[in-house]
Image (cartoon, grey):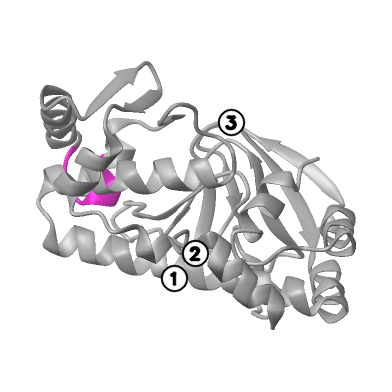
């Protein structure tokens, strides 16, 4: 099912009932396919649907007067791109596919109905929104206060853990369908500098690249090197948190 990655992601926070899962699955009314670099939605649009990434990678971005399109977030399977449009009138950023994508459409009215029917889903989607904000805060800190080699290591750690959380990693590796320009953009460095940093991490034995696959050779070492604390991803002590939230 197209919502399985979303369900797996939300269950990091709270155990969903079968009825909750049914509501999520039934909210999907259409699925569309987007090519790499194709816009999914534009800033200023008033979308009638919330977009769920089912397959591939997408990005939030802003368009600047000089033509630049800085990336604000990477979106992977299980990520709801714009759940806030159920409350806001228009998009304040754009979405584009970074690889061929399958995107599920959940109408605004279906989202609103779902939230009225399930307090657990309301809490879970609110948690997912707060998680997006936590990731953005960490990106801001990383870009402003970490050297380039740590920025790259930090991003690789984050994406490995995010992909693992939705069952899309294998043996500490994951598909990374991005160009060096796109990687450099989120780290605030050039593609040439990005290439140097990749070579540095390879030289240290921390990573290996196999085509578009990123392999982390020693996650503990990479986390130490990048000063990566996974707390902001809220995946720590999952069992204890689930017990606490489910009991409330």
SS under mark 2 = loop
Disc number for residue 177? none
Residue drawn at point x = 49 percent, y = 64 percent: 93
Q: In the rendered structure, which segment of residues is drawn in magenta?
A: 184-190
Residue drawn at point x = 87 percent, y = 75 percent: 113
SS under mark 1 = helix
* Residue beneath disc 2: 93
* Residue beneath disc 3: 100
SS under mark 3 = loop
Disc number for residue 133? 1
Q: x, y percentage for residue 27?
A: 85, 59
On screen, 23 above or below 157?
below
Of residues 2 and 83, the one drawn nearer to the viewer in this rendering: 2
Does the CB distance between marks 2 and 1 fall below 8 Å? no
In the image, residue 11 lies in the stretch drawn in magenta? no
Q: Which marked residue is nearer to the observer: mark 2 or mark 3?
A: 3
């Amino acid at each position: 099912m197209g919502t399985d990655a979303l369900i797996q992601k939300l269950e990091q926070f709270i155990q969903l009932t079968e009825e909750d899962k049914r509501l999520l699955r039934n909210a999907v009314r259409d699925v569309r396919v987007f090519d790499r670099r194709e816009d999914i939605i534009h800033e200023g649009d008033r979308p009638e649907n919330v977009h769920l990434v089912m397959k591939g990678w997408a990005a939030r971005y802003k368009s600047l007067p000089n033509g630049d399109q800085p990336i604000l977030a990477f979106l992977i399977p299980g990520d709801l791109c714009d759940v806030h449009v159920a409350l806001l009138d228009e998009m304040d950023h754009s979405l584009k596919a970074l690889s061929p994508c399958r995107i599920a459409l959940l109408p605004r009215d279906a989202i609103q109905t779902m939230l009225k029917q399930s307090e657990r889903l309301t809490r879970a989607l609110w948690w997912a929104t707060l998680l997006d904000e936590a990731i953005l805060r960490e990106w801001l800190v990383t870009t402003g206060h970490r050297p380039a080699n740590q920025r790259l290591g930090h991003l690789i750690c984050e994406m490995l853990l995010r992909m693992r959380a939705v069952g899309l990693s294998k043996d500490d590796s994951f598909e990374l369908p991005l160009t060096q320009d796109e990687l450099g953009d989120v780290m605030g460095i050039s593609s040439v500098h990005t290439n140097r940093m990749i070579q540095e991490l390879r030289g240290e034995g921390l990573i290996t690249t196999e085509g578009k696959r990123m392999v982390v050779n020693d996650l503990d070492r990479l986390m130490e090197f990048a000063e990566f604390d996974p707390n902001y991803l809220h995946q720590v002590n999952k069992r204890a948190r689930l017990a606490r939230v489910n009991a409330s």
